[in-house]
Image: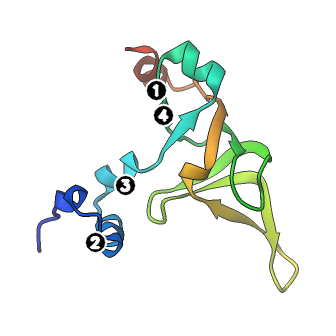
Amino acid sequence: MKKFSRSWISSKNPNKQRKYVANAPLDVRKKLLKVHLSKPLKEKYGKRTVLIKKGDTVKVMVGSFKGIIGKVSKVSYKNLRIFVEGVKTRKADGKDVLVGINPSNVQIEELDLKDKIRQKSITKK
């Protein structure tokens, strides 16, 4: 199997960047799921971005669902999308389904700090 190349950063070519993301292993994909914190959280923790997790409360900043605040119900590492409660669309057969949102289009309003490991990683500087 061919080794994954991390040299895409030197390229501004969009198709090379898309190829990098499409072929990226899970450890790289995880880094692509970081989300910006709101201003009060940014000041409190001294960090700009945090890895998104199920249970976090987010606000949609861009798109047709702009302004909706809801909890993250699912995080998809395969598709690099997050699913937020309240961000739904209706299918042709009448069922409501959650819409996948790019993590760059949301902002974390409230963190879920039940996990002690996550709490420790966020508070350290």
For the residues marked 3 and 1, what is the alpha-carbon distance in whole angstroms?
18 Å
Whether residue 55 can be seen here = no
For the residues marked 3 and 2, what is the alpha-carbon distance in whole angstroms?
16 Å
For image coordinates 44% across by 64% down, the residue present is 78
Label 2 neighbour load within 10 Å: few <14, some 14-19, many 20+: some
Q: Label 4 near label 3: C-beta < 8 Å?
A: no
Q: Earlier in the sequence, mark 1 or mark 2?
A: 2
Residue 32 appears left or right of 26: right
For the residues marked 2 and 4, what is the alpha-carbon distance in whole angstroms?
26 Å
Counting from the top left corner in percent of width and height, residue 103 is at 55, 51
Q: Which residue is mark 1?
A: 118
Residue 85 appears left or right of 10: right
Q: Which residue is mark 3?
A: 29
Q: Label 1 near label 3: C-beta < 8 Å?
A: no
Q: Earlier in the sequence, mark 3 or mark 1?
A: 3
For the residues marked 1 and 4, what is the alpha-carbon distance in whole angstroms?
10 Å
Whether residue 85 can be seen here = yes
Q: How many marks?
A: 4
Which mark is nearer the camera, 3 or 2? Answer: 2
Judge by depth and name the residue closer to the eye, 81 or 118: 81
At label 4, which amino acid type do we have?
Val
Q: Which residue is mark 4?
A: 50
Label 1 neighbour load within 10 Å: few <14, some 14-19, many 20+: some
Q: Earlier in the sequence, mark 3 or mark 2?
A: 2
Quarter of the image for residue 90 reads bottom right
Q: Earlier in the sequence, mark 2 or mark 4?
A: 2
Q: Quadrant of the N terminus?
A: bottom left
Outermost residue on the front side: it is 12
Residue 64 appears left or right of 106: right
Q: Which residue is mark 2?
A: 16
For image coordinates 51% across by 26% down, the residue present is 115
At label 3, which amino acid type do we have?
Arg
